[in-house]
Amino acid sequence: MAETATAEPTRRDFLFIATGAVGAVGVAAVAWPFIAQMNPDAATIAAGAPVEVDLEPIAEGQIVKLFWRGKLIFVRHRTPEEIKAAEEVNVASLPDPEADSARVKEGHAQWLVVYGNCTHLGCVPLGHAGAYDGWLCPCHGSVFDTSGRIRQGPAPTNLPIPPYTFVSDTKIQIG
Ligand code: FES
């Protein structure tokens, strides 16, 4: 596992390197836990095949990042408060109206899985930030809520949902 002195020990996000690629390690600079079972082999990644993600190590309140088909994905284990905040929004008032229930899988509202690039110009929003404690994009200030929906700023749409299914209560397959 690569570690650097620049990692922030108090940071709640942590990165699972899902590619095993050296380049990804450089970006990650992780002191955060590396979960081996989330690391599919390079051939699987190269082929863009589905990947399974074990949710068990992801504590409530945490956001993990992984790459699938070269794209960043956030997996967020939402707290009851975060779910409540996402569900109580007047959907009609949203810039990109979408109910929270349409963005999570039935019976798994604690798990939000979204692509991790801002829908404005592609920067990576910061988790647990912004007025809604969802994400805040540091580039031009787009604010996303705990459902990954755009609430303020120039991003035109919500963070999209990648294709995924639950293969068990504690495991999803992306792709
Ligand atoms: S890239 Fe996120 S607000 Fe512009």
Image (cartoon, rainbow, N blue to C red):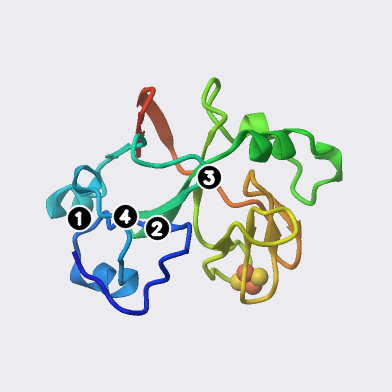
Q: CA distance from mark 4 to mark 3?
A: 16 Å
Q: CA distance from mark 2 to mark 1?
A: 23 Å
Q: Earlier in the sequence, mark 2 or mark 3?
A: 2
Label 3 secondary element: loop
Q: Nearer the viewer, mark 3 or mark 1?
A: 3
Q: Residues within 10 Å of mark 4 (few under 14, many from 20)?
A: many
**Residue at the image position 28 percent from the left and 77 percent from the top:** 4
Q: CA distance from mark 3 to mark 1?
A: 31 Å
Residue 61: give its label.
3
Across and down, in percent, residue 39 comes to: 21, 49
Label 4 secondary element: loop
Label 1 secondary element: helix
Position of the C terminus by quadrant: top left
Q: Which residue is mark 2?
A: 14
Across and down, in percent, residue 132 comes to: 73, 53
**Residue at the image position 19 percent from the left and 71 percent from the top:** 22
Q: Nearer the viewer, mark 4 or mark 3?
A: 3
Q: Which residue is mark 4?
A: 16
Location of residue 125 by image quarter: bottom right
Residue 46: give its label.
1
Residue type at the position of mark 4: Phe
**Drawn side of residue 162 relative to residue 45, left or right:** right
Q: Earlier in the sequence, mark 3 or mark 1?
A: 1
Residue type at the position of mark 1: Ala
The quarter of the image that holds ligand 1 is bottom right
Q: Are marks 2 and 1 in contact (CB under 8 Å)?
A: no
